Image: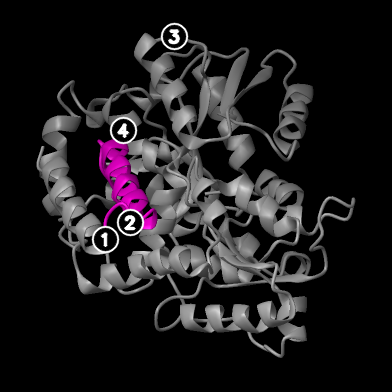
Amino acid sequence: MRRVRGISKAATLIAPALAAALILSACGGGGGGTSQNSDALTGTGPITLVQGKDTSGNRHNQIDAWNKMHPDQKVTLIELPEDADTQRQQMVQNFTAKTATFSVVDVDVVWVAEFAANQWIEQLPEAQIPTSSYLAPTLETAKYFNKLYAVPRASDGALLYYRKDLLTAAGVTNAPTTWADMTAACKKVQAKQPSIGCFTGQFSKYEGLTCNFSEAINSAGGTILNDQGKPDVNTPQAKAGVDFLVNGFKDGYIPKASLTYKEEESRRAFQDGNLVFERNWPYTYAKFGATDGSSKVNGKFAIAPLPGLNGPGVSTLGGHDLAISKFTKNKLTALNFIKFLTGQAEENNNLQATSEAPTWASLYDDPALVAKYPYLPVLKQSILKAKKRPAAVQYQDVSAAIQNAATDALTGAKTSDQALAELQTKLTQLLAK
């Protein structure tokens, strides 16, 4: 999930019991399974790539490289705002208008089901994609009813960034593996530096909150949906996860300002030296390690798996896939450009330029890359063990329900018991449609 625009933002992961209910509402217009044959991806010429803001600048570099090699098939970058909800809204508006403006769309992994079901994106020729080269969870995000509608461009597993220098000075020798370990370490650091905050994540009311809230529940042994695809969020395990966050705001180990944080706000707070711990995606590693004076934590931070209630926690699976708009021209160029951006060479290029999580499994085991990016083994395990967000064609409604419940609990508008009970009811209604 570089950022969750997200994380991410999987349709074949819909549990069998849920799929039947979803297909009635999702495929009323013929469904994703009746997409135009992928052999019909024809036409060469100029195209556009549509994505969130290119904060690293590397997408421009990659496009320049393509354009130099293909002067008659130039790609123009269309940058959307940073936040996921606005990106999705603008893509949906373009699709519903059936305009040809958007060619290749960079989509959060949780949007593939909706876009495919509404026949907004093309089914892709799987035989032309090196599917066996990708981390298995990333490939599954690109499918809808077992058919390929996108190609994994970047994966995401959340990491715990921490101030190794501050922990060492406070006599803490190991990264925390539990929430109790983390808060205890904070107290030791704050005994020496009372002004520094303890921990933050992304708790503004947007897609990132869905990821953080789900992680807390999953890291306490709970779940949003059970193995049968039915809501199962009103449980003691889920409450334990939510209470970790609720108590964090009450007791102050999560700063109140975190209620306004998305990825970039929380990244800046840690990068400016205001926090001991931060939960974020791997793209921030390069920002924290910047040597141009922009980072106050360069050389002072380390990474670890997310902590949980009784041991290591569980990340939400994030990432971005590339898909082709049903309504664009020059679809063969679009397909070839996707192959270029998602090939091993450009995945390696993008990793080294941005620290985004690659999708090619081999890159995580490359000794030279691991020496340069020591977070790769931790990140690989984070991705392989990550849990997906609830896969539903009406995902935006599901995510909105989770965000509403989370906000009510975190702000104290409702108790965690009330918020979870109401979320159980709301999800049951949504997934019964």
Give percent across and percent down for residue 352: 75, 52
Which type of secondary structure does the marked residue at label 2 adopt?
Answer: helix
| First reached walking from the N terminus: tag 2 or tag 3 | 3
From the image, tell me which residue sits under label 2.
409
From the image, tell me which residue sits under label 3.
99
Q: Is residue 89 left or right of residue 303?
A: left
Give percent across and percent down for residue 404: 31, 45
| First reached walking from the N terminus: tag 2 or tag 1 | 2
Gap between marks 4 and 2 measured at Cα: 28 Å
From the image, tell me which residue sits under label 4.
114
Magenta stretch, residue numbers:
388-414
Gap between marks 3 and 1 measured at Cα: 46 Å
Q: From where the camera sits, is residue 9 visible?
A: no
Compared with 152, 272 (above or below) is below
The quadrant in which the C terminus is found is top left
Callout in the foreground (3, 1): 1
Callout in the foreground (4, 1): 1
Gap between marks 3 and 4 measured at Cα: 18 Å
| First reached walking from the N terminus: tag 4 or tag 2 | 4
Tag shown at residue 415: 1
Q: Is residue 410 left or right of residue 180?
A: left
